[in-house]
Structure formats: C-alpha cells, structure tokens
C-alpha cells in the first residue's frame, strides 16, 4: 500500500482504534479465528474506503 497521499483522518483514526482493540483482545485470548477474520475484513473495507476518498479528493 502506498502512503504518498494522506489518509482521511477519521478513517485513519478508526483503523488505529480497531487495530489497538484487536491487539488487546488477542493478548487476552478473547477472540476466535472467526472474529479475527471478521475484524480483518472490516479493516480491509475501511482501507478501501480510504482509497476511494483519496480518489474523490483529487483536484
């Protein structure tokens, strides 16, 4: 993934929060593999949204 342009701040914050939540849940072994897969899917969708926002903001 390229980081040349800035990500949408709200989507970036959501991604960071989701990753932090996943890390804490994993360290406490509270997530099943299904839940991890679902969270990964949400992150992937979020990053695709970031790419769409980047495309729309071109001058």
Image (spheres, rainbow, N blue to C red):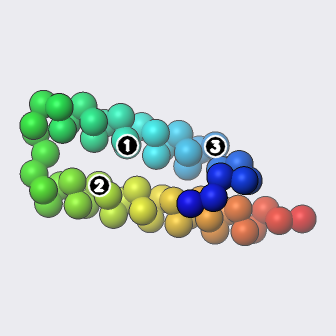
**Residue highlighted by disc 3:** 9
Q: Element under label 3? A: helix
Task: Assign a secondary structure to mark 1.
Answer: helix
Pointer 1: residues within 10 angstroms few (<14), some, or many (20+)?
A: some
Q: Which residue is mark 2?
A: 39
Query: Is residue 27 left or right of 44 when viewed as pictured?
Result: left
Quarter of the image for the N terminus: give it.
bottom right
The answer to whether mark 3 and mark 2 are in CB contact below 8 A is: no
Q: CA distance from mark 3 to mark 2?
A: 20 Å
Please provide percent x and percent y for residue 45.
44, 65
- Give yes or no for contact between labels 1 and 2 (Cβ–Cβ under 8 Å): yes
What residue is rendered at 72% in x and 53% in y?
4
Pick whichever of labels 1 and 2 is earlier in the sequence. Answer: 1
Residue at the spot 71% in from the left edge and 48% down from the top edge: 6
Residue 40 image position (x, y, % from top left): 32, 58
For marks 3 and 2 on the same chain, the one whose residue lies earlier in the sequence:
3
Q: Nearer the viewer, residue 10 or 48?
A: 48
Circle number at residue 18 = 1
Q: Is residue 24 left or right of residue 9?
A: left
The picture places residue 27, in percent across and down from the top left corner, at 17, 31
19 sits left or right of 15 in the view: left
């Amino acid at each position: 993934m390229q980081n040349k342009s800035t990500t949408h701040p709200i989507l970036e914050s959501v991604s960071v929060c989701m990753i932090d939540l996943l890390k804490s849940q994993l360290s406490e072994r509270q997530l099943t593999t299904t839940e991890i897969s679902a969270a990964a899917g949400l992150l992937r969708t979020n990053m695709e949204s970031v790419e769409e926002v980047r495309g729309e903001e071109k001058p």
